[in-house]
Image (cartoon, rainbow, N blue to C red):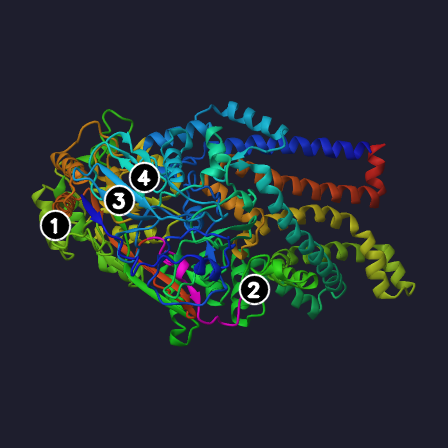
Amino acid sequence: MRYLSRRLAHGFLVLAGVSVLSFVFVALAPGEFLNEMRLDPRISPEMVAALRDRYGLDQPLPLKYLHWLQSVVRGELGFSFAYDRPVAALLWPRARNTLLLTVPATLAAWLIAVPIGAWSASQRGRWPDRVCAGTTTALLTVPELLLALGLLVVAVRTGYFPIGGMRSAAFAELREWAKVKDLAVHLFLPASALILVNLPVLIRHVRSSLIDVLAAPFIQGAHARGVPPRRLLFRDALRAASNPLISLLGLSIAGLLSTSLVVEAVMSWPGLGPLLLEAIAARDLHLVIGAVMCSTLFLLAGNLVADALLYLSDPRVRADQV
Amino acid sequence: MKRVVERLLTPALLIAVACAAVAGAPQRAAVRAEDLLVSRAEIGRPGGQLVINQHAEPKTLNPVTAVDSVSGEVIKNTIADLIHVNRETQRAEPALAKAWTMSSDGRRYTVTLRQGLRFSDGDPFDADDVVFSFRVHLDEKAHSGQRDLLTIGGQPIAVRKIDQHTVQFDLAEPRAGAERLFDGVAILPRHLLERFHTEGRLADAWGLSTPAAQMAGLGPFRFKEYVPGERLVLERNPYYWKADRSGTRLPYLDRLVFMPVTSDDAQTMRFQSGEADIASKMTAASFDVLAKAGQAAPYKLVDLGAGLDYSFLFFNLNDLGSSKLPDTARKQGWFRQVAFRQAISLAIDREAIVRLVYRGHATPLWGHVPPGNKVWINRSIPQPARSLDRARQLLRAARFSSKPDGTLVDQRGDLVEFSIVTNAGNSERVQMATIIQDDLRQLGINVHVVTLELRALVDRLLKTHDYEACVLGLGNADGNPNTEMNVWLSSGATHLWSPEQSRPATPWEAEIDTLMRRQLTTLDPTARKRLYDKVQELVAQNLPFIFLVSPNVLVGADKGLGNFRPAVLDPHTLWNVEELFWRQKRSSGTP
């Protein structure tokens, strides 16, 4: 319990630090929200001045931060200039969509990576291992943007998949099972993009951790005593290799989140990605910070899960705390 | 008194009870006769929906406070104005106003409203709604984007109700083409918004989370549903005030679905695959990709020719005084010479820009009114062809000289080099700047291209004045000179090369000031055109902006879409949304 509360306190500190830093960065970036309006000949400087006053853009930075903290306490997470609404109301539906994309993608990526990595480790040096290494290298070199666009092109050519979006326009009229199917069809391409981007890293890690373990004397011994190789690989070796892999889980969530911002924007997935992108371009201060905080929160939650798993699986971690 | 007779309301068509029944509006025992406007477009078939992609999400449905173009695209379908500029003919036409008269001094407009009309929630519309709407748009605290346009001679327009169906507008001074001011001024439902306005909370009204039942308008569609990040759906307004020649109430379509699709590529692919039915403001690259399918394609592409946008290069002519920018101040010695600017203009290869940046889908420009603006263009503006020789002559006459290696130096022997800033997000502008860089290298001028994010760029242009030259674009929303006052008046905030001057810096700027102010109050259209022609000449001679090209308006729609008549004026494809209908729909995509 002490371990958990310490991790929580640590997470809270990170959140506070991220909020201050992102606040300073966004505030120091040249240009402000109303600048695009200034280029419109139909809008007078008086009107821009009135809006500056309304949004409190002239306040000094510490005061702005204080106002933001107050709104965090109220549960609003600040106020979006562009949407004229509290940020929290804008974030939650999109955060949910981002989770809807990243959670299945994370699970699928691990479910694919573990057997392939393990198999590749057991075949070390032989041709399946080489093919695997070649494929992962190739995948690693493809930028995520290109991968996402490439998948879209596939969708256009084949016509099997919708071109981006999360639901069809006629979603509301569909029956229950058709709704699930519609969602799954829309999920397939962005999730594939996420999986393909993150898969090579995971496979390589699984492979190298297992290779270390497979070389260990206890595995060699079990092998010599005639334990079947498959059982040895998936039951004993994998368990022994779980420690670095669980740590990797936390990291992989960070990777997936940052990839998902790009993939969402390209594939029009209504998550945090497009919202954050537009908010940064528009200098919508509170919305940027809100979206960054939201991503940080996911990241911390992912790491916390990994920590908790580590705590449960590795007695040494528990021993350190006593 | 000049009587403007309504041209659209052909043989006295006061379609009443019958029409209400056709469109499925609730029938009442005694429905008042409705002054329906009869469309002369092809008679269509009711039903179906239209899917439209947008670059970002709409932010609000509040017609008063909306300032971003994405929200505007949606809101335009839900509102109506008294007098509307026909996007096809570019002329003002009756809308909610059945007719209007202007007093001989041009200061009083008396508007007769259509009778028996209803808002999209079924509540009746009358003069009180009009008076309320203008009160809101003119209220300083409401932050209406229309307020500045409705303030004439420093005074807000005075609005007075004469009777239930007549409203009188008094202007502090005569204003040419004042009827165009009514275009886009949304008439609001007093019964829904007055409470918000009195409490000073108008900005909170009609956000995206407001229930549809609490919103109403006079446009062809009304709000139905919003799913954050995914789509916004408008449904048919059963009380809309236009009908077709057969008496069917418009609009034909049941729904408009707006979907945010951030990237251009994804938008193109969605249109190609039939997941979006209509494409506006396409890039030349997307247009060419889609055009490859040729006649067999299930969609139709239209290049409407030059629009109202124009791009240009300009130099920093701000009075930098004893500022922290000594280097820029020194270079202003060149920038301020008309001959220098003329030489630059002569060296720029506009045809290359059209060919390379816009793949042929643009029109070279030498003045600020593009050929898309049929009413106002001055066709006698000279269009000198590119000539490096003449450019060199001009530079020599201005005491610039070339070193043996070809580089250009000024009379003090300083190398002529400067930087061009432009906004990073706009690849066309970056490419134009690069072409200019190459063109000027042939004169021996060394140019650096610097890209900045748009909002950071605006800081430099309008606040710190820390730049040397810039490639930018502007658009004239309705083609009328009045909306560009702030660009050409030397005191204007978007007089980009040297904004907000306390007094005109040059004689030609002073002359433009006078001409622009005179055209504002000149009621005779021919005299007014002459004044604006002169402004165009002065600008073309003095080149505060060195004009480059006007991008063509590129649009597309599914071939099965009837009454698709795109226009150069914004909104290019949806300006006649009430008349659009499905002849047949291709099978792929949404049903």
Q: Mark 4 against mark 3, which lies toward the viewer?
A: 4
**Picture coordinates of residue A262, whole percent (x, y):** 54, 52
CA distance for labels 2 and 4: 51 Å
Q: Identify residue for label 2.
A: A162
| In the image, residue B276 above or below residue B147 | below
Q: Mark 1 against mark 2, which lies toward the viewer?
A: 2
| In the image, residue B31 above or below residue B287 | above
**Picture coordinates of residue A145, whole percent (x, y):** 52, 56
Chain where mark 1 sits? B
Q: Identify residue for label 4.
A: B167
CA distance for labels 3 and 2: 46 Å
A224 magenta-colored: no
The earlier-in-sequence mark between 1 and 4 is 4
User: In the image, what residue occupies the spot 45% across and 28% down?
Assistant: A54
Mark 4: amino acid: Val
Label 4: how many Cα within 10 Å (few below 14, some 14–19, many 20+): many
Q: Is residue B398 left or right of residue B279?
A: left
